């Protein structure tokens, strides 16, 4: 499932990140790597950027950046 | 005593690096810039066990690529300055990502000590870290500290001294998978044999950077040996093709993944024990649930920004007024003590007004930086960027641009000087330049008296509506101009937004004061000299060459005639003559001649020479437009706070009408920023190129707007 379609509160494990270059590296530097677990914790007032929790930290990224991240959704939080 | 030891502090943003730096150096620190860039360089000194230590706080980074100024600065410093010890501050509550940077220090082979910070927070989150085994596995000392309280800092400094005595720090060899390892085996030997950049970088590191397609290293290598570099790049391209076709990945991504693999393999060997499950909401998340809520969030943000704004501009007023009184006192003392003549005029109108102009901004800048430091250190500024990014990104800017816009007059009455300086919180270079070039379009406090004058004279029936429209127009124009710049001179991909929302923290007073003071002092120091020069130049333009002797004699005769006559109101008549003389003097000055010369262009926008001179004077400070217009209409000195006489004069003048007023209004809102702002732009952009660009671009833009308004308005017969 693509990151863009994740609902607030939904968790998942990153399966792939299909971008290299500056953005690809930035994502990895911030800990967004295949195998990492994350939870979407919310979205900005205009639905973009998205806010997520990963490795005990909160990251934000724009939807068009999230597009490059594929996940397998795991659980729905109450 | 021996030379001081050079220590560099490095680490991720929000890892507590600056807290440690402040703890170590206290007030014994100063801020400068790294050559050629506007990244703050903080240095300080301390003594430990009778050893002198000189500490540099490197910019916080997540990595050591060539993609951001901060990373380049950090890496160049490590390589060129070769500090005796590098202290890497690692946030214990987020070990994996923090060690990604440490891993790159190991690859580079710098003398490293890891300061494991926030072990207390990690403990609370159920993470306990075995520092001994971490140290053994990484091959560098690891010292647990709590930077906020200073716990463990002495032990850290002991180890730093010990490490500084070691001589060898060979780079750690990481494995990056079969394909990349093979490529490294192919390219590292020729790098070693030909000594390509080996004076500065380890050969294997250069090889790795070539595979990572690192712009800076490639450029340096090309300069030194282009034939060899081309061969190496060719090998790197083969690797890229191979990886693309087999696993659909880029070399730099594979390298990054293997760094994480290395880190994970270490952490798995009993370094980290989780005592309880961590998937719970921390205080920060709870606050964020409300503060970044999609409905309440923006309301809270509006309230906070408005609060900051009011505090900055209201509470700094008394200091501004005090400074104003002080400079008035200086002026009147100079007036009383010096003999009449050009020297007195220069000291009063050039020097005192100029220095007063610079210092007049200081209270505002101090208050604003204090406010921003509170928002920044508490972690709220990142939330503002998060909430506003969607709108600003649309115009090619960044969520963090909102702050400079507000401060500059997004709520009418700000000031572009602190606004331009506030762009420092932006880390995306193109978005930053676009922001600092467009914030001067906002209606700052100095434009307000001018806008009030013109609106009062010609649109008095709808004063509030026009003032509001002026604010809205400023926003629209600034954002569209930003979009335009980002599509032309500042064209290019947006910088990735990916950023951390740091946990909320209570800012420490000491940190806030240091923050505020260093930025304010930088302003005074850098702006002061240039602004004094320009101020004297502007004074000369408005004063020289003065009236010819025969003209002066004419006015004197007129005065004598009035004094001699019995029947008229002498005082009022004499004042009238003074006004006429000042007008004639101004008209004859260099600025006056420029104003008359400019009529050939400005008449298309409906400005006569009087308006032109006022606009030239407005370059000193926008409120000067009012007083210069007063002189040009021979009303003598006009107080910007009380403009009734000038307003009536303009409203009655045959040359003025609502269309002209609108055209002048537009021009004043959008033409060249005042020179204090221009100097601030030059400082913040790191080059005078952008300062001149902003003067030219804004003036041209304003002229086009005004000509359009005047021509269309006249055509429609509204004038």
Image: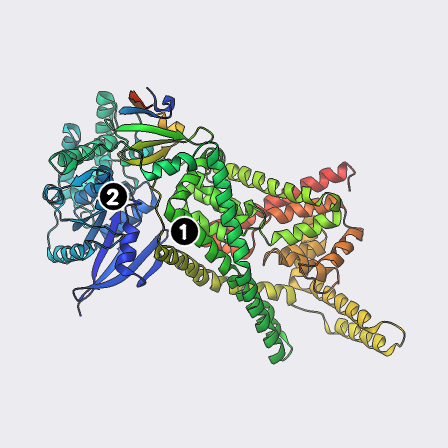
The answer to which image quadrant residue B389 occupies is top left
Residue to which mark 1 is pinned = B373
* Chain designation of label 2: B
Q: Is residue B686 above or below residue B526?
A: above
Front position in the image: B173 or B389:
B389
Q: Circle 2 is placed at which residue position?
A: B121
Say which quadrant the N terminus of chain B sits in.
bottom left
Identify the image quadrant of the C terminus of chain B.
top right
Q: Is residue B492 visible?
A: no
Residue with the most extreme right position:
B567
**Residues at circles 1 and 2 in contact by the CB criterion of under 8 Å:** no
Residue B201: percent from left, percent from top: 20, 47
Q: Above or below — where is B93 with respect to B577?
A: above
**Quadrant of the rendered structure where residue B645 is?**
bottom right
**Residue B669 badge:** none
Q: Residue at x 14, y 31 (%)?
A: B182
| Residue B192 locus on image (x, y percent) | 14, 43
Between B477 and B135, the one nearer to me in the picture: B135
Say whether residue B251 is visible.
yes
Asked if B463 appears above or below B524 in the picture, the reply is: above
Residues indicated by labels 1 and 2 sit on the same polypeptide chain: yes
Between B578 and B417, the one lying in front of the other is B417
Q: Position of residue B590 (x, y in %)?
A: 65, 62
**Number of disc labels:** 2
Query: What's the residue at 58%, 40% (across, down)?
Result: B477
Q: Earlier in the sequence, mark 1 or mark 2?
A: 2
Pinpoint the chain carrying mark 1: B
**For the residues carrying marks 1 and 2, which lies nearer the camera in this image?**
2
Residue B369 position, x and y percent, is 44, 53
- Write down the quadrant of residue B245 in the picture: top left
Which element carries disc 2, helix, strand or loop? helix
- Say few, some or many: other residues with alpha carbon within 10 Å of mark 1 (under 14 / 14 to 19 / 20 or more): many
């Amino acid at each position: 499932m693509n990151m863009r379609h994740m609902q607030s509160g939904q968790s998942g494990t990153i399966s792939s990140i299909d971008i290299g270059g500056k953005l690809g590296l930035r994502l990895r530097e911030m800990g967004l790597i295949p195998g990492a677990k994350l939870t979407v914790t919310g979205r900005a007032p205009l639905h973009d950027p998205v806010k997520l929790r990963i490795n005990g930290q909160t990251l934000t990224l724009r939807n068009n950046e999230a597009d490059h991240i594929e996940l397998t959704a795991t659980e729905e939080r109450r | 005593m021996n030379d001081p030891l050079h220590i560099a502090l490095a680490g991720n943003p929000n890892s507590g690096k600056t807290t440690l730096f402040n703890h170590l150096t206290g007030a014994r620190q100063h801020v400068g810039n790294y050559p050629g860039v506007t990244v703050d360089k903080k240095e300080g000194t301390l003594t430990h066990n009778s050893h002198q230590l000189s500490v540099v706080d490197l910019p916080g980074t997540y990595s050591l690529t060539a993609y951001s100024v901060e990373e380049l600065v950090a890496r160049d410093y490590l390589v060129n300055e070769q500090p005796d010890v590098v202290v890497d501050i690692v946030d214990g509550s987020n070990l994996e990502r923090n060690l990604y940077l440490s891993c790159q220090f190991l690859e580079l082979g710098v003398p490293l000590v890891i300061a494991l910070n926030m072990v207390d927070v990690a403990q609370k989150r159920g993470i306990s870290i075995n520092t001994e085994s971490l140290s053994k596995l990484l091959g560098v000392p690891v010292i647990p500290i709590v930077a906020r309280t200073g716990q463990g800092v002495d032990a850290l400094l002991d180890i730093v001294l010990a490490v500084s005595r070691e001589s060898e720090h060979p780079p750690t060899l990481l494995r990056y998978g079969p394909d990349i390892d093979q490529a490294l085996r192919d390219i590292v030997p020729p790098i070693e044999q030909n000594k390509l950049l080996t004076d500065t970088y380890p050969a294997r590191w250069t090889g790795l950077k070539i595979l990572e397609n690192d712009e800076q290293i490639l450029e340096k290598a090309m300069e030194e040996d282009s034939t060899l570099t081309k061969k190496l790049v060719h090998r790197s391209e083969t690797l890229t093709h191979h990886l693309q076709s087999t696993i659909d990945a880029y070399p730099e991504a594979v390298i990054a993944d293997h760094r994480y693999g290395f880190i994970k393999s270490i952490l798995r060997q009993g370094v980290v024990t989780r005592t309880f499950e961590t998937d719970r909401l921390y205080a920060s998340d709870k606050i964020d649930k409300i503060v970044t809520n999609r409905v309440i969030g923006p309301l809270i943000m509006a309230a906070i920004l408005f609060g900051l704004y009011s505090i900055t501009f209201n509470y700094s007023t008394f200091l501004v007024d005090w400074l104003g009184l002080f400079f008035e006192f200086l002026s009147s003392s100079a007036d009383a003590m010096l003999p009449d003549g050009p020297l007195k005029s220069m000291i009063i109108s050039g020097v005192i007004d100029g220095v007063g102009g610079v210092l007049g901004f200081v209270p505002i800048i101090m208050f604003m930086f204090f406010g921003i430091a509170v928002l920044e250190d508490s972690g709220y500024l990142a939330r503002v960027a998060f909430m506003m990014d969607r709108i600003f990104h649309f115009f090619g800017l960044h969520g963090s641009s909102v702050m400079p816009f507000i401060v500059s007059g997004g709520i009418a009455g700000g000031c572009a000087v602190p606004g331009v300086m506030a762009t420092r919180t932006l880390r995306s270079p193109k978005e930053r330049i676009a922001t600092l070039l467009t914030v001067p379009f906002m209606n700052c406090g100095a434009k307000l008296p001018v806008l009030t004058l013109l609106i009062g004279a010609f649109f008095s029936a709808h004063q509030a509506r026009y003032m509001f429209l002026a604010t809205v127009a400023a926003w629209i124009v600034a954002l569209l101009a930003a979009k335009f710049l980002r599509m032309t001179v500042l064209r290019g991909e947006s910088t990735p937004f990916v950023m951390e929302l740091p946990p909320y923290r209570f800012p420490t007073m000491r940190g806030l004061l240091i923050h505020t003071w260093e930025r304010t002092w930088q302003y005074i120091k850098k702006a002061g000299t240039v602004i004094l020069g320009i101020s004297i130049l502007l004074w000369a333009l408005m004063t020289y060459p003065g009236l010819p002797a025969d003209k002066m004699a004419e006015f004197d005769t007129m005065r004598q005639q009035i004094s001699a006559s019995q029947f008229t109101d002498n005082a009022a008549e004499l004042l009238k003559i003074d006004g006429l003389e000042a007008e004639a003097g101004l008209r004859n000055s260099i600025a006056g001649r420029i104003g008359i010369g400019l009529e050939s262009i400005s008449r298309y926008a409906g400005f006569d020479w009087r308006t032109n001179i006022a606009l030239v004077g407005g370059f000193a400070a926008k409120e000067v437009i009012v007083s210069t217009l007063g002189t040009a209409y021979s009303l003598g000195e006009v107080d910007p706070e009380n403009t009734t006489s000038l307003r009536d004069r303009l409203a009655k003048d045959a040359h003025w009408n609502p269309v002209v007023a609108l055209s002048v209004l537009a021009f004043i809102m959008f033409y060249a920023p005042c020179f204090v702002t221009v100097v601030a732009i030059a400082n913040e952009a790191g080059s005078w190129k952008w300062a001149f660009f902003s003067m030219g671009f804004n003036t041209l833009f304003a002229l086009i707007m005004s000509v359009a308004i005047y021509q269309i308005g006249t055509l429609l017969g509204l004038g």
